[in-house]
Image (cartoon, grey):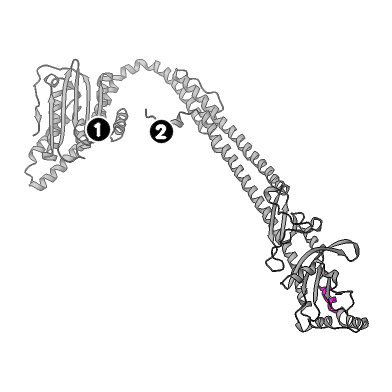
Amino acid sequence: MRQSSGWLGFVNNIPLRWKFNLIYLLCVLVPILTINVLFFWQVSEYIQSRELNNLQIAMERLNKKAMDMIEGGVTLSHSVATDRTLHELLDKEYADSVDFYNSLNGVLAGKMRPFMSAYTYVENISVFTENPTIISGGNYFILNERAKHSPWYEAASNSSSAVQVLMYESVDPMNAQSSKVYFSIVRKLNDYPMYGHYAKYLRIDLKVSSFEEILEEEKPYLAISMLDPVGRVLLPTSRYSLPMDVPDSGETDGLSFQIPMGNLSYIQDWKLVGLAEADRFQSAVQSSQRFIWMLAAVSTLLPTALIFVMLRSYNYRIRLLSRHMEKAKNEKFDLIMLREGKDEIGGLIRSYNRMTTQIESLINDVYKLEIQQKDMELERIRAEMKLLQSQVNPHFLFNTLNAMLVVSAKNGYTEVTDIIRSLSQLLRRMLSWSDAAVPLQDELHFTEMYLKIEKFRFADRFAYHFHIEEDASHCLVPKMCIQPLVENACKHGLQAINGQRVIRIEAWRTDTYLHVQVEDNGKGMDEQRVNEIRRLMNESLNTDENVGMRNVYKRLRLLYGERVHFYIDSRPNEGTRIGYRIPALFGDEGGTQHVFGAAGR
């Protein structure tokens, strides 16, 4: 029997239970768990990326709102600074307070009122001047020594930039005992040099509460602080402090972000710093984690239950069938009492039950018909021998006729006499022989006539040799027990090679056995092909493959039974040797002796 090799043979040796466990483990459990782990990792990454993106958007949204207010204040300062009338009135020396209030009520007071109504986030607009003739109040103030010691004045007077944005702490004008945080935009009013007799400064105070409101809007996402260029926390005012280090995400329990507020000169190096708590990410991940693990449990347990039910059905029935087949080896043909089902395993169980029923019935019939079979056995063997003899392959006759036609066409019908004579003798002997055995020398003479025909076909490229012991030439053999082997060698071994073709026929006797061997120098066969031919030897003759050789083997087996030894040896490109050993039987001793020598004629 052919054995599976390699990994397939290894798999075939694994018990069925372990195969099912491996199928479940490697094809169901591991893939499901791997997919769920990868899905959880991917979802976690997506959630974190989404949250980071949301926080970044919140930072940018807050920065835009803050910059809109600051840029609005800067625009307002530019509008005030370019008012020529305002410069002229602030640079004018008034005769007395009545003169100033007339200007204030007529023009100056109305200058600021529209701006205050248009910019709702502006807390106050203040103009400071060194003109001693004005009276401080409303939006206009004398730039005295106290004002010159304030942070906004120092920032405006010491800077070369036209506009300064700063946040500082100063005295609350409503309560001199407490301080107040100001967010101011300051600039010098020097756009008109002709009115530059007195120094003039503009201070626009933005509502700190407006900035804290937009910070509060983003509080559900993260805590945001506004830092100035030196690192002071400006907003929220509750954390207003000296320079501080910006927290790193690795040094906090959450994640920190910072973005610059802008690249304008008056806001350069200001930044927004946001800190998001880690709980925000953990809660989102935990929510998805619960869903994923619930999905993993369902996708694992449900297939596991289904696979367990199905594989258990297969495993149980196959093991039961295997046990009953082991019993059958010991001639115990018990039926499998089981609801077998309609699948393939059920079909095997039904077939096994039918087979055991038929075997038991046949065993009973054998005992009853044993005597009748003995009487009929001889007639069956004779009929089968006649059938086998009628299946002689006639291909060589057609090959011979084709050769005769070719040669006749080339040589004008002058070389066909001998070949036709040999062919006639072959046909005459085939038709006249009976079922009786013939001496080996007669069978060899018949084979030699066939070889002459083959030599006619191949001319000088073909030779044959007989090596026959004298003791063997008188042994009786079945007719047509050598010629089919020779024909097989010519047809399958010699036609496919170039150069000299040689067939060697040997026969010798040892003790009570006759040995016959046919050897050629043809193309040969590999081990796989030889094994396939050996397997075909015991099959029926319904197929056309190797009919002659199988015919010889079957007739020998019918005549001599187990005393026949038939062998085939072959190697690629070295030739093939076919032979057999049969009991040596003799007929009358008066036969004509025919001894063959080497034939290369």
Q: In which quarter of the image is residue 491?
A: top left
Kind of residue indicated by mark 1:
Arg
**Tag 1 residue:** 571
Q: Nearer the viewer, residue 353 or 92?
A: 92
Residue 330, percent across and down?
45, 17
> Please, what is the dominant secondary structure of the magenta stretch?
helix
Q: Visible in this render: residue 449?
A: yes
Q: Which residue is drawn at 87% across and 64% down?
A: 171
Is 290 drawn above or below residue 212 in the view shown? above
Please report the bounds of the magenta region as a residue range. Answer: 110-118
Q: Residue at x 19, y 32 (%)?
A: 520
Left or right of 514 in this view: 253: right
Element under label 1?
strand
Q: Residue at x 58, y 35 (%)?
A: 307
Q: Which of 120 and 583 is in front in this view?
A: 120
Kind of residue indicated by mark 2:
Gly
Residue 376, percent across and down?
31, 19
Residue 242, percent across and down?
77, 57
Q: Quadrant of residue 228?
A: bottom right
